[in-house]
Image (spheres, rainbow, N blue to C red):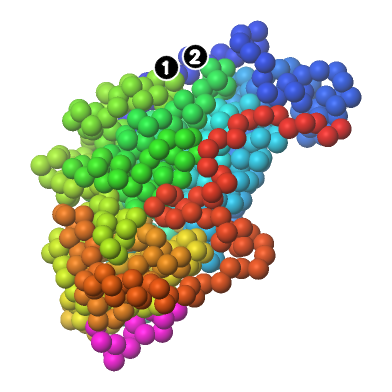
Amino acid sequence: MSAAILASFEKVSTHMTFKKASWPRKLRSTEWYGGTSRDHIYHRSWMKNQGLPADLFDGRPVIGICNTWSELTPCNAHLRDLAQRVKHGIYEAGGLPVEFPVFSTGESSLRPSAMMYRNLASMDVEEALRANPLDGVVLMVGCDKTTPALLMGAASVDIPAIAVSGGPMLNGWFRGERVGSGTALWQMSEDVKAGNMSSDDFLEAEQAMSRSPGSCNTMGTASTMASMAEALGMALSGNAAIPAVDSRRRVMAHLTGRRIVDMVKDDLKPSDVLTREAFENAIRVNGAIGGSTNAVIHLLALAGRVGVDLTLDDWDRLGRDIPTIVNLMPSGRYLMEEFFYAGGLPVVIRRLGEAGLLHRDALTVSGRGVWNEVREVKNWNEDVILPVERALTGQGGIAVLKGNLAPQGAVLKPSAASPHLLTHRGRAVVFEDIDDYKARINDDALDVDETCVMVMKNCGPRGYPGMAEVGNMGLPPKVLKKGIKDMVRISDARMSGTAYGTVILHTSPEAAVGGPLAIVRSGDMIEIDVPGRRLHLDVPDEEIASRLARWQSPVKAPESGYARLFHTHVQGADTGADFDFLKGQRGKAVPRDSH
Ligand code: FES
């Protein structure tokens, strides 16, 4: 954390003296605690069984600490400890902290996909915030989906909210080389398939990849979403990159706890921060950091919650000419630890501001414009945060391709793709779904070479519930053995933010609802023109129409439970894969007391 950022925190801290008399309005929590009726006594008395002194119910703000801690979400397993630091800050500033758990979406374990549960977690957050006596909330986030889920839930209720991330793991090291979370896993598994690495070595690398608590240490989805939270203004400046085990992560948690109390005082809500300008800033930041394609889906969904009309076209337009200057895996060389030492995200935001690519006045949770937070920061390592002349790519944003194969759009991350494949025509090799892919990919009889375009269907939001991160299909062994590292791949799936390759994702509409992807056949020719933003199936229109007329969805609606709710209500990837009934804000109305 730079001296400038610390100084800025201290400036914030001086505004934090809590004076009961200074509360300008009635707090929401007084509906529960602020009186002498039977119900007020009922609400307070049961809380007091936790040993809370009476004066903690004197009208001070009640601050929720919404925690995604779980041992089943290893990236967030340290968040209970961090929550204690948040509590210190809240108490210090004059609030009453109350920690509560919400559904935790662990990326590495949840099946069929963590993404299937993002909306469920957001509903959990939303209802917990609305139903409880909370005046504000600190969102404890880390692993991929936990950040968007909590932001979405808080945005729907629109009480003062601030995020603090758990922070990334320390660098992984294996035999003198950096091993990045996820990225190394994909690389090494391909090396094993190609015969360039032994299985024993792969097993030895397993522990080396994950040396400490924290989230993935690459610029994967977790780091991207932590950066998005900061760029949107929903976390304090400097939050994204501090390693999980660095003492400054605890300082960040402490200061976040202090800050939320003042946010309640000022009634600074998500709707004040999550403006169109904030989303535009975040899209540009995503280009500059070489962020995950998953950010596209999550920001579209979040924008939907606050009524900002954000579209895929905004992603393409705003990110198109943004150079990727953060030299982190999977696009570059370093890891989050080094990004932090170099100055972290504030340096990147400052660069955008200097280039005239930032809405400088966009409000942040600090109560000040984003430019105020970053204007004095310095870059301490120009190999990690590169000068524009040495950018990884001049076009770091997300490319949105459209055409008869993706009428509503598909996305590609140019910074992770092979330049020679960005314009390509190739023969389709089609897999009907993930099982078909797994059954045939290792078969040397598969009719495929490096000029082909691998196509996988039925992995969109409904096809593979939640839209699993399988879009970066591993290459066939017979291609890998030739030393080939990349091929064009197209699907309606997502891709891990830690992955790389010329991978076209989120093809919309998805195959399972009858998008044109559903009728592609092996042997069809496909044209990819990333500079022209075109994705074309070279099959006559009449033939496409005829195939679509005969198409039947292979995906059946689940009979019951959350899976059925998901199937029935999930929207397409092109609008964020949120539920139709969760769009927009539903406010913080106090529910009627049942006693
Ligand atoms: Fe949790 Fe990557 S798997 S952050």
The alpha-carbon separation of the residues under discs 1 and 2 comes to 7 Å
The residue at the point 71 percent across, 17 percent down is 59
> In front here: 345 or 43?
43
Indicate which quadrant contains ligand 1.
bottom left
The residue at the point 60 percent across, 31 percent down is 587
Q: Which residue in the protein does label 1 denote?
A: 11
Which type of secondary structure does the marked residue at label 2 adopt? loop
Residue 527 placement, left or right of 411: left
Under mark 2, the amino acid is His
**Residue 236 in view (yes/no):** no
> In front here: 100 or 310?
310
As for residue 25 lying within the magenta part, the answer is no
Which type of secondary structure does the marked residue at label 1 adopt? helix
Asked if 439 appears above or below 300 in the picture, the reply is below
Under mark 1, the amino acid is Lys
> In front here: 68 or 135?
135
Q: Which residue in the protein does label 2 denote?
A: 15
Q: Are marks 1 and 2 in contact (CB under 8 Å)?
A: yes
Task: Give the percent coordinates (x, y) of residue 560.
Answer: 67, 65
As for residue 442 lying within the magenta part, the answer is yes
Residue 277 placement, left or right of 87: left
Asked if 428 appears above or below 117 in the picture, the reply is below
